[in-house]
Amino acid sequence: MARPPPPGRCVHCLGFFEEMTWDHVFPEAWYPDTTPDNVEKWKIPSCRPCNALQGKNEGELLVRFGLCIDPDDPKNAGIVEKALRALTAESGRDEKDAKAREAYRQKILRQVFEGEAIPFQAIYPGFGPRPGIHDLTLVAVPVSATGIRTLVEKIVRGITYVHDRKFVESPYKIEQFVLTDEGATPLTDILRRFGKVYERGPGIIVTRAVVPEDQMTAFYGIEIWGRFKAYASIERDKSEIVR
């Protein structure tokens, strides 16, 4: 069993703590079954409260995204099954857990949109209707925008710490962008020309381009399971600059 980190700063909240834990940059449960055994699953020092909050958010996102991806794609092998188990009473560890899973399933069912009730303008890029499926048969699962922002910020903070041993703090801040493939073209061009690709197996790919002048400003392209794409940057907060 790995030793906990020594006393220090939490990558998430930046506070100093005597007792620290390890948190995975990419949720451990998010790695598909096709991930090679020799892939290093990056870890970062985190305080216990932040670790717990991140874990809860990641579990929620895994279920909701897991219900919307192709179970036969090797880039997400096993992810759909994990999502379904979280909603299946028979998978419960005990009676209390079984009831919690059933209650969660009912919660998801109450929240879904069907057919013409789906707010198509709010669909996350890459998760729209598939060709050949009639609109009236579609079902949409709502996903928290705050949850997505929390996940993307964690990944950016985590990679910055893993590779540079730096914390993202004032005067720098993280900006996030929800873009279609077409809308992301200017950013993906920059990442293709100047970025470095980090692959954590077939299901997780991150491209990062760091501006050499300050070694902190950077652009990120994140792709998970071949479906979820997110873009972010670390930039100097202009409001923090003393004129």
Image: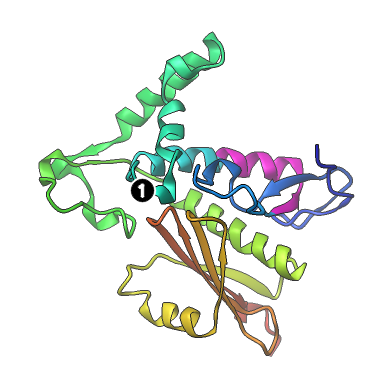
- Specify start and end residues of the magenta stretch as a single range: 43-56
Numbered disc 1: secondary structure: loop
Is the image coloured rainbow, by chain, by secondary structure, or in one colour? rainbow
Q: Would you say residue 77 sits in the magenta stretch? A: no
The quadrant of the picture occupied by the C terminus is bottom right
Picture coordinates of residue 212, whole percent (x, y):
66, 87
Q: Residue furthest top?
A: 95
Q: Is 99 or 121 nearer to us in this picture?
A: 99
Q: How many marks?
A: 1
Q: Is 141 or 163 nearer to us in this picture?
A: 163
Instruction: Count neighbours of disc 1 (C-alpha within 10 A) and say few if under 14, some if 14 to 19, many if 20 or more.
Output: some
Residue at 54%, 58% (x, y): give it.
152
Picture coordinates of residue 227, whole percent (x, y):
37, 55
> Badge 1 is on which residue?
73
| Above or below, 51 relative to 162 | above
- Would residue 53 be found to the left or right of residue 165 on screen? left
**Which image quadrant for residue 102?**
top left
The quadrant of the picture occupied by the N terminus is top right
**Which image quadrant for residue 112?**
top left
**Which image quadrant for residue 57?**
top right
Residue at 74%, 71% (x, y): give it.
164
**Three-letter code for the amino acid on which mark 1 is drawn:** Asp
